Image (spheres, helix red, strand yellow):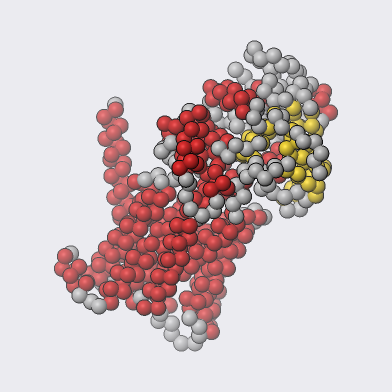
Amino acid sequence: MINAFTQFFHYSFIQNVAIAAVLLSIITALIGSYIVVRRLVFLSGGITHSSFGGIGIAWYLGLNPILGAVVFSVLSAIGLEYLSQGKTLREDSAIGMLWSFGMAIGILFVFLTPGYAPNLMSYLFGSIITISKTDILLLLILALLTLLFFLLFYYPILFVAFDSDFAKTQNIPVKFIGYSLSILIALSIVFAIRAVGIILIISLLTIPANIANAFTHRFKNIILISMLVSFVSIILGIVVSFKLNVPSGATIIITMMVSYLIVKAIKLVKHKIAISRVA
Amino acid sequence: MIDDNNMLIEVVNVTAGYGHQVVLRNVSLPIYRNDFIGIIGPNGGGKTTLIKLLIGQIKPFSGKIVHNSGAQDSFIGYLPQVSQIDRTFPITVREVVLSGLLEKKGLIGGYNRQQKSLAMELMEQIGIHHLQSKSIGLLSGGQLQRAMLCRALISEPQVLILDEPNTYVDSNFEGELYEMLRKLNEKMAIVMVSHDLGTITSYVKTIACVNGTLFYHPSNQITNEQLAAYNCPIQIIAHGPVPHTVLLEHPNNASHRIHKH
């Protein structure tokens, strides 16, 4: 394993990957903790998959696929936030329809595009190894934006997430907070697609927050522990994938899931021991 | 406009609902300083809609709701049903209480020392200061209800609105809660939704029956005939030493809850 690490850091692209891992950890810890405590995981899954429609259309038109994904995911996020405020449609149905509709649009346009689409797999499964300088710049901007938003509006975010009806009685701009976070969720999803891909991204957003929640019941600490868990899992996942020559996105997610199971198992054993002492 | 200086909120001829569906028609209700209004009525009659109107969560289709708040922030304190709260949410008791000062704190930044000590004092008064660092998931129903009550009270509202505060709490806390409310009522108007008229009639001063529309009954004594006339069938079985009217069972209303001690 140590050999794999040294081999790994021998390469020059590794700096890029390390920086990307830090930035991704910041973004996914903030957004992931929020969607987990607000129970927006399924909604985020819908936004993620609908973005494939944008990728397909942009591909067909010869534009940057990420641009298409941004347009699709931001519009879906705003649409879903709007629907959730009106309560005229079942929210899970709306998410389910959008989920596969986006994928359908994407598949159709990719099919219509002449020629072979070799890079398409990287949008589905991700590849943090091949991340570019432009991707890193975009990640940096998004990380700073998200961090700033959470630092400025930490309490309104927490209290709107906890009880938005009560927050409204406090004359807080609940809609502004809701829509801003929807847009940040959408952007985070799109930029994280480069790393782990559409299919795996939901785990990147949910597993670290759930690992963190096993240690703490404070929102602030969930975010901070998630950052650490994300970073360690991403680096460990990349190193393992490098050594075994398997896809990095999948390895990152499996690393996270194994960590989650270990944490849960330790908690279970501790709980059992505590009970047996009492008994 | 409100000409009566003692009127804090005036609901004037309000019709409201959701989408195209009208839930409440032509509702008028005065909320006076130091009033204690018990809101009763069958499920689906519009009690929750009325609360949502009062706290400004929904806007009326027609009519108006006049707030005689002066310049005060957080004029209304609101205690939702505890069942609406996500118990797994990572938030501490202290944070819940401080959320009641969100408007005073403003959108950006943290709480100052004075606001924090205010929260501490209030938690001491209500008897939950030892739980301040606990996550809400670890509280009993009564403890959570107290935390939510602190949140509603910390901004020193002039009107306190409670949505079925007696559900999901043990009967010990229920008695304490009513005593607390009686004391609070010296300082603020209280509007309380309850399904349990038998118990509340000895605490409330006036009664509002909500069932599609609203009948305001400016007394805490109400008979079954009046309830029937208000189209607001509620079964009351009185009990215990508290002196209040003992009423007969409404014949058409077998589905309502029977209160037993």
Q: Is residue A271 visible?
A: yes
Q: Residue at x 43, y 36 (%)?
A: B132
Location of the C terminus of chain B (image quadrant) = top right
Residue B9 percent across, percent down from the top left:
74, 39
Image-based side of B155 in relation to A123, left or right: right
Image-based side of A230 in relation to A167, left or right: left
- Quadrant for residue A5, please give it: bottom left
Which residue appears farthest toward the bottom when viewing the image? A115
Residue A137 percent across, percent down from the top left:
40, 74
Which residue appears farthest toward the right when viewing the image? B229
Residue A176 percent across, percent down from the top left:
58, 59
Of B157 and A82, the residue lying toward us: B157
Q: Residue at x 47, y 45 (%)?
A: B112
- Quadrant for residue A130, please give it: bottom left
Location of the N terminus of chain B (image quadrant) = top right
Q: Taking A190 as reference, is B201 above or below it?
A: above
Of A146 and A266, the residue lying toward us: A146
Total labels: the figure holds: 0
Q: Taking A196 as reference, is B256 above or below it?
A: above
Q: Residue at x 21, y 72 (%)?
A: A9
Q: Residue at x 52, y 52 (%)?
A: A156
